[in-house]
Amino acid sequence: MLAQAQLLFTVAFVEMAVILLLLFKTPLRKLLIAAIDRAKRGRGSLVVKSVGATVLVLLIYTVYSIRDIQSRPLENINPTEQVLLAYQVLQASLMGFALFLSLMIDRLHHYIRELRVLRKVMEAAKKQDQSFDNGKSGDKVSSLKEEISSLKSKIRVLESEREDVRANRANSESLKQQYEKIVDEYGELLEKNEHLRSQLRAIGEK
């Protein structure tokens, strides 16, 4: 009887230690998760379920025995049955606590695995977003470079047109000066012509 109680105490303390290791991120946590993964695969899962079912059946039987003893009148319960009742209450409590802790371990392991998968998915999505942003910024840079090159070509065309306009303006200025010079020379020639005509008229009259 004492050996069974000691075994149940040991199981309960081991399960509490496992829960503490699962709750805090330590180097042993990965090893523990890997061990639980192996225990849940193949025959390990069958063994764990069989042990859990056996403990549950023993718990139900112990609770039934406790109820059977407690249903009797106090006068009919001898000291041996009282000691047995106290031991069965302790045993039922330890078995129930052990089953509860095993359920806690199973749920913690499940949620930790889901959290790991979720983190991996989030990291992959973050990397995809970063690559998409980089590609998008690269497209923007290439489009801006194309716009800059087109603007440079337009600026070159405008500069050449401006040079042509300056050249044409300079040519027009020189042509204007030549025209004015020709007009002046033509005026001088007209004056000389009139002067010669007047001289010829004066000679003819004489």
Image (tube, rainbow, N blue to C red):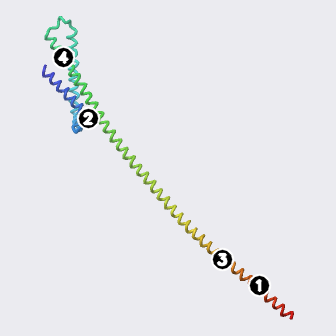
Mark 1 vs 4, N-terminal side: 4
Which residue bears the numbered disc 2? 24
Instruction: Give the class, few, some or many, for how many residues have Cα within 10 Å of label 2's Cα (few <14, many ≥20).
Output: few
Under mark 2, the amino acid is Phe
Q: Earlier in the sequence, mark 4 or mark 2?
A: 2
Q: Which residue is mark 4?
A: 88
Nearest to N terminus: mark 3 or mark 4: 4
Looking at the image, do the residues carrying marks 1 and 4 touch, with CB atoms under 8 Å apart?
A: no
Camera-side residue of 42 and 34: 34
Distance from label 1 to label 4 (Cα)? 151 Å
Q: Which residue is mark 1?
A: 191
Q: Earlier in the sequence, mark 2 or mark 1?
A: 2
**Amino acid at circle 1:** Glu
- Mark closer to the observer (3, 4): 3
Position of the C terminus by quadrant: bottom right
The picture places residue 199, in percent across and down from the top left corner, at 81, 90
Picture disc at residue 23: none
Q: Which residue is mark 3?
A: 175
Q: Place residue 45 in its image quadrant.
A: top left
Alpha carbon of mark 2 to alpha carbon of mark 1: how far?
A: 119 Å
Q: Is residue 176 left or right of residue 20?
A: right
Q: Residues within 10 Å of mark 4 (few under 14, many from 20)?
A: many
Amino acid at dot 3 = Leu
Left or right of residue 12: residue 192: right
- Callout in the foreground (3, 1): 1
